[in-house]
Amino acid sequence: MEFTLEKKEWDYYTDQLSGLPNRFALLEYIKLHSRLNIFVVNIDNFNNINNAYGYVVGDEILTELAKRLQLLKPKNAKLFRFDGDNLYLLSMIFLTFVS
């Protein structure tokens, strides 16, 4: 989001665990931008980590993943935490992949 948010609005648009913009911010961002690349990052069977090691460890893994993706993402891309183990990376510059 490019505008400044008051505390109540910031809480509404921010995931409390990762500090990333959340699903509400994602939906607003999509409404404002008509052409986007959308990449979904999902950890398969993440509930197995929570079940084996507990939610504290699972939360630490999600937080660390969010930090690393923030560092590695292109400058023009924006990272969101949609829910659970689903992160969305949105970019307005179209990427081409060469195989």
Image: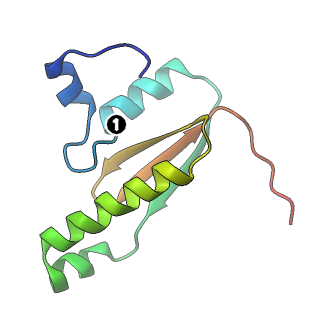
Position of residue 5 relative to residue 78, above or below, is above
Q: Where residue 91 sits in the image (x, y, percent)? A: 61, 37
Furthest toward the bottom, the residue is 52
Q: Is residue 57 left or right of residue 63?
A: left
Q: Is residue 31 above or below residue 65?
A: above
Quadrant position of the N terminus in the picture: top left
- 15 or 64, which is in the foreground? 64
Position of residue 6 measured from the top left corner of the image (x, y, whole percent): 20, 15
Image coordinates for residue 70, horizontal then vertical, percent: 47, 48
Q: Secondary structure at mark 1?
A: loop
- Residue with the mark numbered 1: 21
Question: Image height check: is 52 above or below 77?
Answer: below
Q: Quadrant of residue 92?
A: top right
Identify the residue shown where x is 61% and y is 23%. 34
| Left or right of residue 54, residue 22 in this image | right
The crowding category of the residue bearing disc 1, from other C-alpha atoms within 10 Å (few below 14, some 14 to 19, many at least 20), is many
Residue at the spot 33% in from the left edge and 42% down from the top edge = 20
Q: Amino acid at mark 1?
A: Pro
Frontmost residue, 67 versus 98: 67
Q: Is residue 49 left or right of residue 88?
A: left
Residue at the (39%, 54%) spot, across then down: 67
Q: Quadrant of the C terminus?
A: bottom right
